[in-house]
Image (cartoon, grey):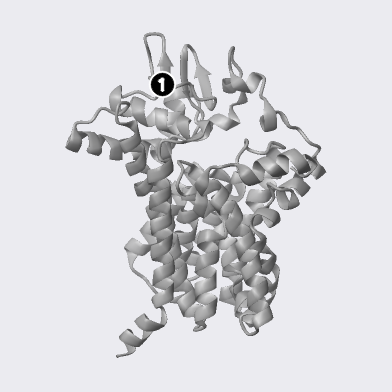
Amino acid sequence: MQGNSSHRRHRTAYGIIGLSALVLVLAVLNHGPWQSTNSLSRLISVERLVEKGTWAHVTPTDSTPFPRSIDVIKVGDRIYSSKPPTYPLLMAGEAMVMKALTGMEFFPHRKDYLRVLLILNQVIPYLLLLWTAFLLLREWTQDAWTINFMLLALGFGVLPFAYAATLNNHTLSAALFFIAYYLVHRIVHRGDRRWWVAALTGFLLGFAVCIELPGGVFAVAFLLLIARKSYALAGIACLALLLPFLPTFYVYHEISGNYKPFYLQGHLYRFEGSYWSNPAGLDAARPDRLTYVIHTLFGFRGLFLLSPLFLLVPGGIRRLWRMSDRDRRGDWGAILAGTLAIMVFVWARTNNYGGACVGMRWFFPFMPLLLLLAWPTVEHLGQSTRGRIAAGLLGLAGLAWSLEVLLNDGFIVGTLEHNWGWLF
C-alpha cells in the first residue's frame, strides 16, 4: 500500500520525465540531420572509422564525403578532428553494430545513423540525469511542488537539456557528472559498499573528464568524498577512472606523436586554409578579460540571463549550509569547486564565446549539478502564491531559450544581436 501511495504522489514527476523524453525524441527526429560544424567534426570521425578504419578526415588518397568541418587539425598531409577521440570512438562502435545489423552504408544513411546515435548518447543519458535527480530530491524533500518544479527546471529550464538533441560533448558530460554524483551519494550517505557501484562511478567520471577536461575537479572532489568513507572503494573508483584515458591518450599519440590533448597543441590548428588562421564573426571577438567574464555571466550568452533559475542557487546554498552536517557540506563544496574550476579554466584560457550558439556551451557540464542546489529555495518559494509565481516566471524565461535551441529558429538570438549587440 505504501508503494502505491508513493507512486500516486509522484505521478506528476513521472509525467514530467516522460514529457521530457517525448520532447527530446521529437527534436531529434525533427532536427537530426541538422548539426553545427562542431558536431560535424565528431560525426565525420565516426564515418571514417566505420567505413575506412581511420581517424583521418582527409588523406592524400582519400577524403570523407561530408563537407569539411572547421574543427580540425593537420598533422603532416592528413586532416583530423580536433575533438577528443573518446566520444567518437564510442559512437563508432555503436555505428559498426548498426551497420552489421542493417548493412546500411554510413553516408547514404547518415540521417538514420545520426538519429540513433543522438538517442543513444545524448537523449538517454539526459533522461537518466532527470531520473537520478528525482531519486535525490525524493530523499531530500517530501514536498511535491519542489520535486516537480526542480524536474521541470532541470529539463526545460536549462540549456543542456535543449542541446541533448544535438551531437555535443558538453551535454553528455553534464549527464555523466550528475549521474556519478548520485552514485557517490549512494556510497557516502546510503552506505552502498558494492564494488561495482564504485567502479561505475569512476568509469563515468573518467569518461566525462576525457571529453570535458576542466571537469576533472569534479572527479577529484567526488573521489575524495568516497575516500572519506572507504579507501578500498575509492581505489576501485580510481582504477576504473583510468580506463577511458587509455584509448584516449593512445589516439592522441598515434595521431600527433604527443600525449597532450589537441587543444593544448595550438600549432596543429595553424595550417594553410585553416579557419582558425582567420576566424570570423563571434570566433573573431576578443574582448578584454573583465568584459568577457561579465558577458559570460550576465550578457545574452551569459549564465544568469539564459538560465535565470540560477538566481535561486545562492539562497539554496545558504539554506543547505545551515541545515547540513559536515558530510553533506562536503557534497555541496565538491559541486561548487567543480563549478568554479570550469569557470576559471574558461576565463583564464580563452576570451572566445564558443561560436554562434545559444549560451556558453563550456558552462553546460556544471549547470544541472549547480541548479540542484536551488531546491531549498524552491521549497521556500512554494509556501506562498507569490513565491510560486516568481519561480514560475524564472522558469518560463529559461524555457524560452530552450525552445530557441529545440526549434532552431534563431529568432530570439537574432533579435537581440540586432538590437542589443553590445550585450553579447
Is residue 59 or residue 255 the one in the foreground? Answer: 59
- State which quarter of the image contains the N terminus: bottom left
Q: Please say if 129 is above or below 413.
A: below
* In this rendering, position of residue 122 left or right of residue 391: left
Residue 224 visible in rendering: no
Residue 199, horizontal then vertical, whole percent: 37, 58
Residue lying at 37% horizontally and 36% vertically, measured from the top left: 89
Give the labeled residue for mark 1: 56
Q: How many marks?
A: 1
Dot 1 lies on which element? strand
Residue 232, horizontal then vertical, whole percent: 40, 64
Residue lying at 61% horizontally and 75% vertically, measured from the top left: 378
Is residue 250 or residue 303 the one in the foreground? Answer: 303
Is residue 230 or residue 212 the one in the foreground? Answer: 212
Residue lying at 43% horizontally and 51% vertically, measured from the top left: 241
Residue 350 visible in rendering: yes
